[in-house]
Amino acid sequence: MNTGFAIRHLGRRSEATGKGKAAGVGRLRSALLAMGFHQTVDQAEHLEFRRRPYLLQDDWPMQVTVRTSGRDVKVTYGAFIPWPWILGFVASIVVVLPFAGILRADLIFVAAALAAALAVLNREFDCRPNATYWQKASRRRWGEALEAAIDQAFARETRS
């Protein structure tokens, strides 16, 4: 990136930090909204965006947080764990299996809860360009798109 933003991939999240002005944050906000993100937090120094998943397009839910402090800007982004889905899955197993006539439904429930926990335990959700395994294509694609959006939003400020 030529805007002076440093990108770090921290495992659970990717983080871009640098200097910027309110106009750049506004341009980044507009770019995120154009990409299909919905703004969930709108405070003076804290913006948060989420994008719903498109599972048939191999796209996982994404979250972007923008924090400002004076001219310091920190953009944190990555895939997030859809806990409502996981809890809904486990709850449906608890409700459905006993009425489906399956013997030892409690063992299946424990197995399902373990499978759900292992699905998210120690997984990386950041958007590194060399992502492997879990949601690698989606994480790589969003990493490139968000780095480009940050670059374009703050590029004008580095020229002036």
Image (spheres, rainbow, N blue to C red):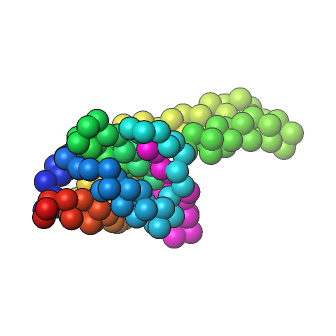
Instruction: Tell which of 128 and 39 is nearer to you.
Output: 39
Indicate yes or no whether the magenta region holds residue 108: no
Residue found at x 67% / y 43%: 89
Q: Is residue 64 visible?
A: yes
Instruction: Tell which of 150 and 84 is nearer to you.
Output: 150
Relative to residue 48, is residue 103 drawn left or right?
Answer: right
In the image, the segment drawn in magenta is 47-61
Residue found at x 71% / y 29%: 106
Image quadrant occupied by the N terminus: bottom left
Residue 100 x, y percent position in the rendering: 84, 44
Instruction: Tell which of 106 and 13 is nearer to you.
Output: 13
Instruction: Tell which of 141 and 159 is nearer to you.
Output: 159
Residue reaching furthest to the bottom: 57
Indicate yes or no whether the magenta region holds residue 51: yes
Q: Is residue 108 visible?
A: no
The quarter of the displayed image where residue 137 is located: bottom left
- Residue 104 against residue 35 in the figure, above or below: above
Residue 19 x, y percent position in the rendering: 19, 47
Relative to residue 72, is residue 81 drawn left or right?
Answer: right
Relative to residue 116, is residue 132 drawn left or right?
Answer: left
Residue 15 x, y percent position in the rendering: 27, 45
Residue found at x 16% / y 49%: 6
- Residue 13 against residue 149 in the figure, above or below: above
